[in-house]
Image: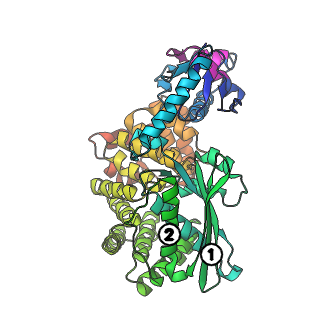
Amino acid sequence: MKIYEFETTDCTLDGTDGALRTPNGALVDLRPQTREVLRLLAMSPNRTIEKADFAEQVWEGRTVGTDSLVQCIAEIRGALGDTDRKVIQTVPRKGYRFVPPSTAVSPTETPKRILPLLLAVVLLCAGVLGMAFYPEDNSHARAPVLAVLPLEDLSPEPLQGYLSDALAEGIITELARFPQFRVVARNSSFQFRETPTDVREIGRVLGAGYVLEGSQQYDGQRLRVTIQLIETGTGAHILSDQYERDLDDLFVVQNEIVRHVASVVGETVMIDLPDRTGAGGVDSLLRGMQARKLMSQLSREHWEQAIALERTSIREEPESEWGYIGTSLMLGTASHMGWMTPMDDVLDEAEELAEIAMRKNPRNYMSHYTLARVLSRRGHHVEAIEHYKRAAELNPSDSLVLIAMSIPLVYEGRADEGIEALERAKRVDPLHGDWLRWQMGWSYWQSGDCEAGLEAMLSMSSPPPPSNKALAALLICLGRTDEARDAMARFLAVEPGHTLKVEVTRIAPNWKPEGTAERWLDVMREAGMPEG
Protein backbone atom coordinates (compact mmCIF):
# COMPACT_ATOMS: atom_id res chain seq x y z
CA MET A 1 0.00 0.00 0.00
CA LYS A 2 1.21 3.49 -0.81
CA ILE A 3 0.05 6.92 0.29
CA TYR A 4 0.32 9.53 -2.45
CA GLU A 5 0.87 13.17 -1.48
CA PHE A 6 -0.31 16.09 -3.63
CA GLU A 7 1.49 19.39 -3.16
CA THR A 8 -1.23 21.38 -4.94
CA THR A 9 -3.89 20.61 -2.33
CA ASP A 10 -1.87 18.96 0.51
CA CYS A 11 -4.27 16.02 0.26
CA THR A 12 -3.20 12.37 0.51
CA LEU A 13 -4.57 9.44 -1.48
CA ASP A 14 -4.63 5.87 -0.19
CA GLY A 15 -3.55 3.59 -3.04
CA THR A 16 -5.45 0.65 -1.54
CA ASP A 17 -8.99 1.96 -1.27
CA GLY A 18 -8.82 5.35 -3.01
CA ALA A 19 -9.56 7.32 0.16
CA LEU A 20 -8.70 11.00 -0.36
CA ARG A 21 -8.03 12.92 2.84
CA THR A 22 -7.31 16.52 3.82
CA PRO A 23 -4.19 17.42 5.84
CA ASN A 24 -6.16 16.99 9.09
CA GLY A 25 -7.24 13.47 8.13
CA ALA A 26 -10.84 14.21 7.12
CA LEU A 27 -12.26 12.52 4.03
CA VAL A 28 -12.68 14.82 1.04
CA ASP A 29 -16.38 15.17 0.25
CA LEU A 30 -16.96 13.41 -3.08
CA ARG A 31 -20.07 11.84 -4.59
CA PRO A 32 -20.27 8.03 -4.15
CA GLN A 33 -19.73 7.38 -7.88
CA THR A 34 -16.76 9.75 -7.92
CA ARG A 35 -15.19 7.96 -4.95
CA GLU A 36 -15.57 4.63 -6.76
CA VAL A 37 -13.99 6.00 -9.94
CA LEU A 38 -11.07 7.34 -7.88
CA ARG A 39 -10.73 3.98 -6.10
CA LEU A 40 -10.44 2.09 -9.41
CA LEU A 41 -7.80 4.50 -10.67
CA ALA A 42 -5.79 4.55 -7.44
CA MET A 43 -5.67 0.75 -7.20
CA SER A 44 -4.16 0.46 -10.69
CA PRO A 45 -1.54 3.20 -11.05
CA ASN A 46 -0.08 3.80 -14.51
CA ARG A 47 -2.64 1.47 -16.11
CA THR A 48 -5.42 2.55 -18.47
CA ILE A 49 -8.88 1.83 -17.07
CA GLU A 50 -11.26 1.54 -19.98
CA LYS A 51 -14.69 3.14 -19.96
CA ALA A 52 -16.37 -0.25 -20.02
CA ASP A 53 -14.56 -1.18 -16.80
CA PHE A 54 -15.89 1.95 -15.09
CA ALA A 55 -19.42 1.16 -16.28
CA GLU A 56 -19.18 -2.40 -14.99
CA GLN A 57 -17.61 -1.73 -11.62
CA VAL A 58 -18.97 1.72 -10.69
CA TRP A 59 -22.44 1.59 -12.22
CA GLU A 60 -22.73 -2.24 -12.01
CA GLY A 61 -23.34 -2.63 -15.72
CA ARG A 62 -26.22 -0.11 -15.85
CA THR A 63 -26.43 1.96 -19.01
CA VAL A 64 -25.28 5.51 -18.24
CA GLY A 65 -24.16 8.35 -20.47
CA THR A 66 -20.47 9.11 -20.99
CA ASP A 67 -21.15 12.47 -19.35
CA SER A 68 -21.48 10.78 -15.94
CA LEU A 69 -17.91 9.47 -16.08
CA VAL A 70 -16.61 12.78 -17.45
CA GLN A 71 -18.18 14.66 -14.52
CA CYS A 72 -16.62 12.24 -12.02
CA ILE A 73 -13.19 12.72 -13.59
CA ALA A 74 -13.66 16.51 -13.44
CA GLU A 75 -14.49 16.30 -9.71
CA ILE A 76 -11.43 14.17 -9.02
CA ARG A 77 -9.11 16.52 -10.89
CA GLY A 78 -10.55 19.44 -8.96
CA ALA A 79 -10.03 17.68 -5.63
CA LEU A 80 -6.43 16.78 -6.52
CA GLY A 81 -5.62 20.20 -7.96
CA ASP A 82 -4.80 18.42 -11.23
CA THR A 83 -5.48 21.42 -13.47
CA ASP A 84 -3.04 20.30 -16.16
CA ARG A 85 -4.38 16.70 -16.16
CA LYS A 86 -0.98 15.14 -15.50
CA VAL A 87 -2.21 12.94 -12.64
CA ILE A 88 -5.53 11.79 -14.13
CA GLN A 89 -4.67 11.43 -17.80
CA THR A 90 -7.17 11.02 -20.60
CA VAL A 91 -6.42 8.15 -22.97
CA PRO A 92 -8.32 9.17 -26.12
CA ARG A 93 -11.19 6.82 -27.09
CA LYS A 94 -10.20 4.34 -24.37
CA GLY A 95 -10.44 5.64 -20.82
CA TYR A 96 -8.32 7.20 -18.09
CA ARG A 97 -5.01 6.54 -16.35
CA PHE A 98 -3.80 7.47 -12.86
CA VAL A 99 -0.16 8.60 -12.94
CA PRO A 100 0.95 9.01 -9.30
CA PRO A 101 2.95 12.03 -8.18
CA SER A 102 6.63 11.47 -7.58
CA THR A 103 6.18 11.52 -3.79
CA ALA A 104 4.71 8.26 -2.49
CA VAL A 105 5.13 7.44 1.21
CA SER A 106 4.67 3.98 2.63
CA PRO A 107 2.77 4.04 5.97
CA THR A 108 5.48 1.96 7.60
CA GLU A 109 8.07 4.52 6.58
CA THR A 110 6.18 7.60 7.63
CA PRO A 111 7.26 7.80 11.31
CA LYS A 112 10.91 7.39 10.35
CA ARG A 113 10.78 9.85 7.50
CA ILE A 114 8.52 12.59 8.73
CA LEU A 115 10.96 14.43 11.02
CA PRO A 116 13.84 14.54 8.51
CA LEU A 117 11.34 15.59 5.86
CA LEU A 118 10.00 18.43 8.00
CA LEU A 119 13.52 19.54 8.85
CA ALA A 120 14.43 19.56 5.17
CA VAL A 121 11.39 21.67 4.40
CA VAL A 122 12.25 24.17 7.12
CA LEU A 123 15.82 24.46 5.88
CA LEU A 124 14.67 24.83 2.31
CA CYS A 125 12.24 27.61 3.25
CA ALA A 126 14.97 29.40 5.15
CA GLY A 127 17.28 29.14 2.18
CA VAL A 128 14.86 30.62 -0.33
CA LEU A 129 13.30 33.44 1.68
CA GLY A 130 15.27 36.02 -0.24
CA MET A 131 14.51 34.62 -3.68
CA ALA A 132 12.08 36.38 -6.02
CA PHE A 133 8.96 34.59 -7.22
CA TYR A 134 7.72 35.17 -10.79
CA PRO A 135 4.19 34.53 -12.11
CA GLU A 136 5.25 32.10 -14.84
CA ASP A 137 7.68 30.24 -12.61
CA ASN A 138 6.70 27.09 -10.70
CA SER A 139 7.98 28.74 -7.54
CA HIS A 140 5.27 31.36 -7.85
CA ALA A 141 2.66 28.69 -7.33
CA ARG A 142 4.09 28.29 -3.80
CA ALA A 143 4.33 32.03 -3.12
CA PRO A 144 1.97 33.60 -0.57
CA VAL A 145 -1.57 34.05 -1.85
CA LEU A 146 -3.65 37.09 -0.87
CA ALA A 147 -7.39 37.67 -1.30
CA VAL A 148 -8.87 41.18 -1.10
CA LEU A 149 -12.53 41.16 -0.07
CA PRO A 150 -14.99 43.90 -1.08
CA LEU A 151 -14.93 46.70 1.48
CA GLU A 152 -18.03 47.26 3.57
CA ASP A 153 -19.75 50.55 2.71
CA LEU A 154 -20.57 52.43 5.95
CA SER A 155 -21.43 55.73 4.24
CA PRO A 156 -24.84 57.32 4.77
CA GLU A 157 -27.34 55.82 2.32
CA PRO A 158 -27.43 58.77 -0.10
CA LEU A 159 -23.64 58.49 -0.50
CA GLN A 160 -23.44 54.72 -0.85
CA GLY A 161 -22.53 53.48 -4.27
CA TYR A 162 -19.34 52.52 -6.04
CA LEU A 163 -16.54 53.97 -3.93
CA SER A 164 -15.94 50.77 -1.93
CA ASP A 165 -15.52 48.61 -5.01
CA ALA A 166 -13.40 51.21 -6.77
CA LEU A 167 -10.99 51.28 -3.83
CA ALA A 168 -10.88 47.50 -3.39
CA GLU A 169 -10.31 46.89 -7.11
CA GLY A 170 -7.55 49.48 -7.16
CA ILE A 171 -5.85 47.74 -4.26
CA ILE A 172 -6.10 44.38 -6.07
CA THR A 173 -4.68 45.83 -9.27
CA GLU A 174 -1.66 47.42 -7.59
CA LEU A 175 -0.93 44.47 -5.28
CA ALA A 176 -1.07 42.10 -8.27
CA ARG A 177 2.02 43.81 -9.68
CA PHE A 178 4.22 42.38 -6.92
CA PRO A 179 5.96 39.20 -8.10
CA GLN A 180 6.61 38.11 -4.51
CA PHE A 181 3.03 36.92 -3.98
CA ARG A 182 -0.14 36.11 -5.89
CA VAL A 183 -3.46 37.97 -5.62
CA VAL A 184 -6.81 36.23 -6.13
CA ALA A 185 -8.95 37.71 -8.90
CA ARG A 186 -11.82 39.97 -7.84
CA ASN A 187 -14.26 37.60 -9.58
CA SER A 188 -13.55 35.03 -6.86
CA SER A 189 -12.89 37.18 -3.78
CA PHE A 190 -15.94 39.41 -4.37
CA GLN A 191 -18.24 36.38 -4.24
CA PHE A 192 -18.07 36.67 -0.45
CA ARG A 193 -19.69 40.13 -0.51
CA GLU A 194 -23.07 39.22 0.96
CA THR A 195 -22.16 35.99 2.75
CA PRO A 196 -20.77 36.19 6.30
CA THR A 197 -17.93 33.65 6.17
CA ASP A 198 -15.08 32.92 8.55
CA VAL A 199 -11.74 33.98 7.07
CA ARG A 200 -10.40 30.47 7.63
CA GLU A 201 -13.06 29.10 5.30
CA ILE A 202 -12.43 31.87 2.77
CA GLY A 203 -8.75 31.00 2.83
CA ARG A 204 -9.53 27.33 2.26
CA VAL A 205 -11.91 27.97 -0.65
CA LEU A 206 -9.63 30.49 -2.37
CA GLY A 207 -6.35 28.84 -1.46
CA ALA A 208 -5.26 32.10 0.21
CA GLY A 209 -2.95 32.44 3.19
CA TYR A 210 -3.97 36.07 3.78
CA VAL A 211 -7.25 37.96 3.54
CA LEU A 212 -7.56 41.74 3.44
CA GLU A 213 -10.90 43.06 4.64
CA GLY A 214 -12.23 46.37 5.90
CA SER A 215 -14.64 49.22 5.35
CA GLN A 216 -14.91 52.74 3.96
CA GLN A 217 -17.08 55.63 5.07
CA TYR A 218 -17.60 58.85 3.12
CA ASP A 219 -19.60 61.73 4.60
CA GLY A 220 -19.48 64.00 1.56
CA GLN A 221 -16.18 65.61 2.55
CA ARG A 222 -13.88 63.14 4.29
CA LEU A 223 -13.10 59.54 3.45
CA ARG A 224 -12.31 57.10 6.26
CA VAL A 225 -10.91 53.68 5.38
CA THR A 226 -10.18 50.86 7.82
CA ILE A 227 -8.39 47.67 6.79
CA GLN A 228 -7.30 44.48 8.51
CA LEU A 229 -4.89 41.90 7.13
CA ILE A 230 -5.67 38.45 8.53
CA GLU A 231 -3.68 35.23 8.37
CA THR A 232 -6.24 32.59 7.40
CA GLY A 233 -4.46 29.66 8.99
CA THR A 234 -4.72 31.08 12.51
CA GLY A 235 -7.28 33.89 12.14
CA ALA A 236 -4.72 36.29 13.60
CA HIS A 237 -4.85 40.00 12.67
CA ILE A 238 -1.34 40.86 11.56
CA LEU A 239 -2.00 44.36 10.25
CA SER A 240 -4.66 46.93 11.10
CA ASP A 241 -4.71 50.50 9.80
CA GLN A 242 -7.08 53.45 9.49
CA TYR A 243 -6.81 56.29 6.97
CA GLU A 244 -8.75 59.56 6.90
CA ARG A 245 -8.38 61.86 3.89
CA ASP A 246 -10.30 64.00 1.41
CA LEU A 247 -11.93 62.14 -1.48
CA ASP A 248 -9.40 63.73 -3.84
CA ASP A 249 -6.74 61.65 -2.06
CA LEU A 250 -8.40 58.30 -2.87
CA PHE A 251 -5.38 57.11 -4.84
CA VAL A 252 -3.01 58.26 -2.11
CA VAL A 253 -4.92 56.14 0.44
CA GLN A 254 -4.93 53.23 -2.01
CA ASN A 255 -1.16 53.38 -2.44
CA GLU A 256 -0.51 53.60 1.30
CA ILE A 257 -2.61 50.48 1.87
CA VAL A 258 -0.79 48.67 -0.92
CA ARG A 259 2.63 49.54 0.52
CA HIS A 260 1.69 48.42 4.02
CA VAL A 261 0.16 45.13 2.90
CA ALA A 262 3.01 44.37 0.50
CA SER A 263 5.60 44.97 3.20
CA VAL A 264 3.94 42.27 5.33
CA VAL A 265 2.95 39.68 2.72
CA GLY A 266 5.83 40.12 0.28
CA GLU A 267 8.46 41.54 2.63
CA THR A 268 9.19 44.34 0.17
CA VAL A 269 7.99 47.80 -0.74
CA MET A 270 7.55 48.84 -4.37
CA ILE A 271 8.52 52.47 -4.80
CA ASP A 272 7.23 53.09 -8.33
CA LEU A 273 3.51 53.09 -7.56
CA PRO A 274 1.68 55.49 -9.88
CA ASP A 275 1.39 59.02 -8.58
CA ARG A 276 -2.32 59.54 -9.19
CA THR A 277 -4.20 62.38 -7.60
CA GLY A 278 -7.00 64.71 -8.58
CA ALA A 279 -10.77 64.65 -8.19
CA GLY A 280 -11.28 64.30 -11.92
CA GLY A 281 -9.67 60.89 -12.04
CA VAL A 282 -11.74 59.72 -9.09
CA ASP A 283 -15.02 60.98 -10.57
CA SER A 284 -14.32 59.27 -13.91
CA LEU A 285 -13.42 56.04 -12.18
CA LEU A 286 -16.66 56.06 -10.16
CA ARG A 287 -18.76 56.77 -13.27
CA GLY A 288 -17.06 53.80 -14.90
CA MET A 289 -18.00 51.57 -11.97
CA GLN A 290 -21.62 52.71 -12.29
CA ALA A 291 -21.59 52.09 -16.05
CA ARG A 292 -20.18 48.60 -15.57
CA LYS A 293 -22.93 47.75 -13.12
CA LEU A 294 -25.54 48.92 -15.62
CA MET A 295 -23.98 46.74 -18.31
CA SER A 296 -24.29 43.66 -16.13
CA GLN A 297 -27.97 43.82 -17.15
CA LEU A 298 -27.25 43.66 -20.87
CA SER A 299 -29.97 45.61 -22.66
CA ARG A 300 -30.16 48.51 -25.09
CA GLU A 301 -31.67 50.78 -22.43
CA HIS A 302 -28.94 50.08 -19.87
CA TRP A 303 -26.26 50.42 -22.53
CA GLU A 304 -27.53 53.89 -23.46
CA GLN A 305 -27.36 54.97 -19.81
CA ALA A 306 -23.87 53.49 -19.42
CA ILE A 307 -22.34 55.10 -22.50
CA ALA A 308 -23.86 58.46 -21.52
CA LEU A 309 -21.96 58.25 -18.22
CA GLU A 310 -18.70 57.44 -20.00
CA ARG A 311 -19.11 60.28 -22.52
CA THR A 312 -19.71 62.63 -19.58
CA SER A 313 -16.33 61.63 -18.19
CA ILE A 314 -14.62 62.45 -21.50
CA ARG A 315 -16.34 65.84 -21.56
CA GLU A 316 -15.74 66.80 -17.92
CA GLU A 317 -12.40 65.07 -17.19
CA PRO A 318 -10.62 64.94 -20.57
CA GLU A 319 -7.23 64.30 -18.95
CA SER A 320 -8.39 61.06 -17.28
CA GLU A 321 -8.13 57.85 -19.27
CA TRP A 322 -11.21 56.24 -17.70
CA GLY A 323 -13.87 57.89 -19.88
CA TYR A 324 -12.05 56.89 -23.08
CA ILE A 325 -11.64 53.33 -21.82
CA GLY A 326 -15.30 53.00 -20.88
CA THR A 327 -16.67 54.54 -24.06
CA SER A 328 -14.46 52.36 -26.24
CA LEU A 329 -15.67 49.21 -24.48
CA MET A 330 -19.30 50.35 -24.81
CA LEU A 331 -18.87 50.92 -28.55
CA GLY A 332 -17.41 47.45 -28.93
CA THR A 333 -20.49 46.00 -27.26
CA ALA A 334 -22.76 48.09 -29.50
CA SER A 335 -21.03 46.83 -32.66
CA HIS A 336 -21.33 43.23 -31.49
CA MET A 337 -25.03 43.57 -30.58
CA GLY A 338 -25.92 45.53 -33.72
CA TRP A 339 -27.03 48.58 -31.73
CA MET A 340 -24.81 50.90 -33.79
CA THR A 341 -23.98 50.62 -37.47
CA PRO A 342 -22.07 50.43 -39.72
CA MET A 343 -19.77 48.20 -37.69
CA ASP A 344 -16.52 49.43 -39.24
CA ASP A 345 -17.30 53.05 -38.36
CA VAL A 346 -18.22 52.11 -34.79
CA LEU A 347 -14.99 50.14 -34.37
CA ASP A 348 -13.01 53.02 -35.89
CA GLU A 349 -14.23 55.29 -33.10
CA ALA A 350 -13.67 52.59 -30.47
CA GLU A 351 -10.08 52.10 -31.62
CA GLU A 352 -9.42 55.85 -31.68
CA LEU A 353 -10.67 56.21 -28.09
CA ALA A 354 -8.59 53.23 -26.94
CA GLU A 355 -5.51 54.84 -28.51
CA ILE A 356 -6.21 58.06 -26.60
CA ALA A 357 -6.48 56.10 -23.35
CA MET A 358 -3.12 54.50 -24.14
CA ARG A 359 -1.54 57.93 -24.59
CA LYS A 360 -3.15 59.22 -21.38
CA ASN A 361 -1.91 56.33 -19.25
CA PRO A 362 0.02 53.41 -20.81
CA ARG A 363 0.59 51.98 -17.32
CA ASN A 364 -3.11 51.36 -16.78
CA TYR A 365 -3.71 47.74 -17.71
CA MET A 366 -7.24 48.64 -18.82
CA SER A 367 -5.80 50.87 -21.56
CA HIS A 368 -4.08 47.86 -23.10
CA TYR A 369 -7.06 45.57 -22.47
CA THR A 370 -9.44 48.00 -24.19
CA LEU A 371 -7.24 48.40 -27.26
CA ALA A 372 -6.76 44.63 -27.44
CA ARG A 373 -10.55 44.09 -27.42
CA VAL A 374 -11.02 46.41 -30.40
CA LEU A 375 -8.11 44.93 -32.34
CA SER A 376 -9.40 41.42 -31.70
CA ARG A 377 -12.87 42.35 -32.98
CA ARG A 378 -11.24 43.72 -36.14
CA GLY A 379 -9.32 40.52 -36.72
CA HIS A 380 -5.90 42.03 -35.90
CA HIS A 381 -5.12 39.12 -33.62
CA VAL A 382 -1.34 39.26 -33.42
CA GLU A 383 -1.36 42.90 -32.31
CA ALA A 384 -4.26 42.22 -29.92
CA ILE A 385 -2.31 39.39 -28.27
CA GLU A 386 0.61 41.70 -27.53
CA HIS A 387 -1.64 44.22 -25.77
CA TYR A 388 -3.38 41.46 -23.82
CA LYS A 389 0.04 40.22 -22.68
CA ARG A 390 0.99 43.71 -21.53
CA ALA A 391 -2.32 44.05 -19.67
CA ALA A 392 -1.66 40.72 -17.94
CA GLU A 393 1.82 41.89 -16.94
CA LEU A 394 0.41 45.08 -15.41
CA ASN A 395 -2.35 43.20 -13.57
CA PRO A 396 -1.70 39.43 -13.31
CA SER A 397 -4.79 38.96 -11.11
CA ASP A 398 -7.43 39.91 -13.71
CA SER A 399 -8.69 36.61 -15.06
CA LEU A 400 -10.86 38.34 -17.68
CA VAL A 401 -7.73 39.60 -19.45
CA LEU A 402 -6.34 36.08 -19.66
CA ILE A 403 -9.63 34.58 -20.84
CA ALA A 404 -10.04 37.26 -23.51
CA MET A 405 -6.43 36.74 -24.64
CA SER A 406 -7.17 33.08 -25.38
CA ILE A 407 -9.63 34.08 -28.14
CA PRO A 408 -7.15 35.60 -30.61
CA LEU A 409 -4.60 32.93 -29.67
CA VAL A 410 -7.03 30.22 -30.75
CA TYR A 411 -7.98 32.05 -33.92
CA GLU A 412 -4.27 32.29 -34.76
CA GLY A 413 -3.87 28.55 -34.36
CA ARG A 414 -1.99 28.90 -31.07
CA ALA A 415 -4.47 26.83 -29.07
CA ASP A 416 -1.84 25.47 -26.66
CA GLU A 417 -0.94 29.04 -25.66
CA GLY A 418 -4.64 29.83 -25.32
CA ILE A 419 -5.13 26.88 -23.00
CA GLU A 420 -2.09 27.96 -20.98
CA ALA A 421 -3.61 31.45 -20.57
CA LEU A 422 -6.88 29.87 -19.40
CA GLU A 423 -5.04 27.71 -16.88
CA ARG A 424 -3.37 30.85 -15.52
CA ALA A 425 -6.83 32.42 -15.23
CA LYS A 426 -8.04 29.41 -13.24
CA ARG A 427 -5.11 29.71 -10.82
CA VAL A 428 -5.83 33.35 -9.94
CA ASP A 429 -9.62 32.93 -10.14
CA PRO A 430 -10.46 29.67 -8.31
CA LEU A 431 -14.21 30.40 -8.39
CA HIS A 432 -14.18 31.19 -12.10
CA GLY A 433 -17.41 31.26 -14.04
CA ASP A 434 -18.79 29.61 -17.15
CA TRP A 435 -17.09 31.92 -19.66
CA LEU A 436 -13.73 30.35 -18.80
CA ARG A 437 -15.13 26.81 -19.12
CA TRP A 438 -16.79 27.67 -22.43
CA GLN A 439 -13.56 29.15 -23.79
CA MET A 440 -11.62 26.13 -22.55
CA GLY A 441 -13.95 23.78 -24.43
CA TRP A 442 -13.62 25.79 -27.63
CA SER A 443 -9.81 25.92 -27.29
CA TYR A 444 -9.58 22.16 -26.84
CA TRP A 445 -11.65 21.66 -30.00
CA GLN A 446 -9.04 23.66 -31.90
CA SER A 447 -6.21 21.63 -30.35
CA GLY A 448 -7.92 18.33 -31.15
CA ASP A 449 -8.44 17.17 -27.55
CA CYS A 450 -12.21 16.96 -27.78
CA GLU A 451 -12.67 14.83 -24.67
CA ALA A 452 -10.97 17.45 -22.52
CA GLY A 453 -13.05 20.12 -24.26
CA LEU A 454 -16.29 18.27 -23.55
CA GLU A 455 -15.26 17.82 -19.92
CA ALA A 456 -14.79 21.59 -19.61
CA MET A 457 -18.14 22.36 -21.27
CA LEU A 458 -20.05 19.90 -19.09
CA SER A 459 -18.65 21.54 -15.96
CA MET A 460 -20.53 24.77 -16.75
CA SER A 461 -23.12 25.57 -14.08
CA SER A 462 -25.53 27.58 -16.27
CA PRO A 463 -24.55 27.14 -19.92
CA PRO A 464 -25.65 30.17 -21.98
CA PRO A 465 -27.54 29.16 -25.15
CA PRO A 466 -24.77 30.37 -27.55
CA SER A 467 -22.34 27.89 -25.95
CA ASN A 468 -24.30 25.07 -27.57
CA LYS A 469 -22.51 25.79 -30.85
CA ALA A 470 -19.11 24.92 -29.34
CA LEU A 471 -20.68 21.95 -27.57
CA ALA A 472 -22.03 20.68 -30.91
CA ALA A 473 -18.55 20.94 -32.47
CA LEU A 474 -17.01 18.87 -29.66
CA LEU A 475 -19.73 16.21 -29.89
CA ILE A 476 -19.25 15.91 -33.65
CA CYS A 477 -15.54 15.49 -33.03
CA LEU A 478 -16.31 12.58 -30.70
CA GLY A 479 -18.73 10.94 -33.14
CA ARG A 480 -21.83 11.73 -31.07
CA THR A 481 -23.85 13.18 -33.95
CA ASP A 482 -27.33 12.88 -32.45
CA GLU A 483 -26.28 14.75 -29.30
CA ALA A 484 -24.53 17.36 -31.46
CA ARG A 485 -27.74 17.95 -33.40
CA ASP A 486 -29.64 18.39 -30.13
CA ALA A 487 -27.09 20.99 -29.03
CA MET A 488 -27.36 22.82 -32.35
CA ALA A 489 -31.15 22.81 -32.05
CA ARG A 490 -30.83 24.53 -28.66
CA PHE A 491 -28.55 27.13 -30.22
CA LEU A 492 -30.90 27.77 -33.14
CA ALA A 493 -33.86 28.08 -30.77
CA VAL A 494 -32.40 31.39 -29.52
CA GLU A 495 -30.70 32.32 -32.84
CA PRO A 496 -33.30 31.21 -35.40
CA GLY A 497 -31.84 33.26 -38.23
CA HIS A 498 -28.30 31.94 -37.83
CA THR A 499 -27.15 30.01 -40.89
CA LEU A 500 -23.90 28.83 -42.43
CA LYS A 501 -23.99 31.95 -44.58
CA VAL A 502 -23.95 34.08 -41.40
CA GLU A 503 -21.20 31.88 -39.95
CA VAL A 504 -19.05 32.43 -43.02
CA THR A 505 -19.36 36.21 -42.60
CA ARG A 506 -18.96 36.52 -38.83
CA ILE A 507 -16.78 33.67 -37.61
CA ALA A 508 -14.93 31.91 -40.41
CA PRO A 509 -12.73 34.89 -41.43
CA ASN A 510 -11.15 34.90 -37.97
CA TRP A 511 -9.57 31.45 -38.36
CA LYS A 512 -6.04 32.05 -39.62
CA PRO A 513 -4.51 28.55 -39.98
CA GLU A 514 -5.23 27.21 -43.44
CA GLY A 515 -8.14 24.78 -43.52
CA THR A 516 -9.46 25.58 -40.02
CA ALA A 517 -12.37 27.70 -41.24
CA GLU A 518 -13.44 24.93 -43.64
CA ARG A 519 -13.16 22.36 -40.85
CA TRP A 520 -15.33 24.52 -38.56
CA LEU A 521 -17.98 25.05 -41.24
CA ASP A 522 -18.09 21.32 -42.03
CA VAL A 523 -18.65 20.59 -38.34
CA MET A 524 -21.43 23.18 -38.13
CA ARG A 525 -23.08 21.68 -41.24
CA GLU A 526 -22.88 18.14 -39.84
CA ALA A 527 -24.39 19.33 -36.55
CA GLY A 528 -27.41 20.71 -38.41
CA MET A 529 -26.78 24.41 -39.00
CA PRO A 530 -28.89 25.36 -42.05
CA GLU A 531 -27.19 26.55 -45.24
CA GLY A 532 -29.12 29.84 -45.44
> What secondary structure prevails in the magenta region?
helix
Q: Which residues are magenta?
A: 36-57
Residue 428 drawn above or below residue 395: above
Residue 47 or residue 311, whichever sits in front: 47
> Which color mode does the image show?
rainbow
Task: From the viewer's perspective, tell me whether residue 325 is left or right of residue 196.
Answer: left
- Residue 476, can we see it? no
In the image, which is nearer the foreground, mark 1 or mark 2?
2
Residue 444 image point, x, y percent: 43, 37
Magenta stretch encompasses residue 50: yes
Q: Residue at x 66, y 52 (%)?
A: 236
Examine the image and state in which quarter residue 299 appears. bottom right
Nearer to the camera, 234 or 183? 234
The residue indicated by pointer 2 is: 256
Disc 1: which residue: 161
The kind of residue tagged 2 is Glu
Give the Cα distance between marks 1 and 2: 23 Å
Residue, x 29% and y 39% (percent of image)? 515
Q: Tell me if residue 381 is in the magenta stretch.
A: no
On the image, the x and y values in percent for residue 457 come to 54, 40
User: Dot 1, crowdedness within 10 Å: few (<14), some or many (≥20)?
Assistant: some
Report the front residue among 424 and 443.
Answer: 424
Amino acid at circle 1? Gly
483 relative position to 400: left or right: right
Q: Residue 187, can we see it? A: yes
Q: Residue at x 39, y 62 (%)?
A: 369
> In the rendered structure, which disc, 1 or 2, sits on the residue that comes first in sequence?
1
Q: Is residue 267 above or below residue 2?
A: below
Give x and y (percent) for residue 317: 42, 84
